[in-house]
Amino acid sequence: MRRHTMTQGIGPMLREWRKRRNLSQLALALQADTSSRHLSFIETGRAVPSRELVLRLADQLNVPIRQRNSLLMAAGYAPAYEETPISETHMDRANEAIDRLLNGHEPYPALVFDSISDLRRANRSALALLDGIADELLVPPINIMRVALHPEGLAPRILNFAVWRGHLLGRLRREAVLTNNERLATLYDEVSSYRYAKSVFDPAREMEPDMPDGQSIAIPLRIRALGSELSLFSALTVFAAPVDITLSELTIETFYPADAHTATVLHSHLQLAGADEPAPDQLVALRAAP
């Protein structure tokens, strides 16, 4: 994956973000309520933007808030956003919201991951899908892209692997480009280079079963798990308007049954596991992660 390293200095950094968003100086200036002449002077180092203008430009460029701090410091200002460990008391309300969502989503899988796709939390239904994969992939920090795409991870059990692999790699690449995150770019290079047995890409595995109503609403994840073949589609949720770096980098992925059979299997599994049992050790360990 091609990488772009931002040059130090507020001018070159803003110019690089502007180019990433395919915006002209005039278009960005209009959106940020400044002049294209002033923006040109900033990008060439002939002017220093005010703190307020840096934040307006970053907002219009959809710069992640971690990198907004970098822009502010490059312009000579103090960072605007804190990074609070998720385990601190200050995060109790956010933790409560996450717990409610994960627990309330049972018996369907749900998980939380950070900006580099490391797993931070999961409900018991999501953890059940990880049963049987290589132990080394479950050593914290557990990376969901490695778990899904590694030859000793879920890959051999995903029945439409070529389609699902394309979906995950596309999502990962877009996020790496959007955020200019070097670690995501490195992760993309790693997981896109995995080699598989021919059986993983067997065309017969890629054929989608007919939906009862004749159509599907999203690309499903078709996987062998819990002693059956399951079909799931997913949705991504993020915190709206976060002002803390930790919250801004958390994503909650919730999976839903794409057919009645999958719903039945997941409900039965939760009943057998015991809905009132305490969370498994893996979940406790994930909650204690920084």
Image (tube, helix red, strand yellow):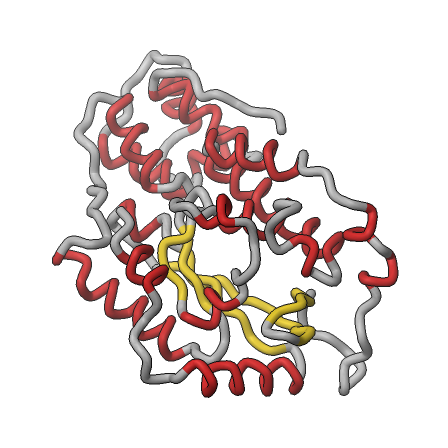
**Residue positioned most to the right:** 204
As displayed, is residue 136 above or below residue 180? below
Toward the viewer: 56 or 255? 255
**Residue 77 placed where, x, y %?**
19, 27
At 49% from the left and 29% from the top, the residue drawn is 25
Front-most of 261 and 269? 269
> Please, which residue is most extreme toward the left here?
89
Q: Position of residue 8 (x, y in %)?
A: 37, 16
Q: Quadrant of residue 3?
A: top right
Residue drawn at x 40%, y 39% is 63
Q: Position of residue 40 (x, y in %)?
A: 43, 20
> Residue, x 51% and y 81% (percent of image)?
269
Viewer-proximal residue, 55 or 286?
A: 286
How far across and down, in percent of the image, does residue 282 sit?
36, 60
| Quadrant of the image containing the N terminus | top right
Q: Nearer the viewer, residue 253 or 14?
A: 253
Position of residue 253 in the picture relative to residue 198 (left or right): left
Relative height, residue 200 to residue 52 (above, below): below
Q: Identify the residue shown where x is 63% and y is 80%.
A: 262
In this view, 195 is above or below 90: above
Q: How many marks?
A: 0
Task: Tell me if 254 is positioned left or right of 157 in this view.
Answer: left
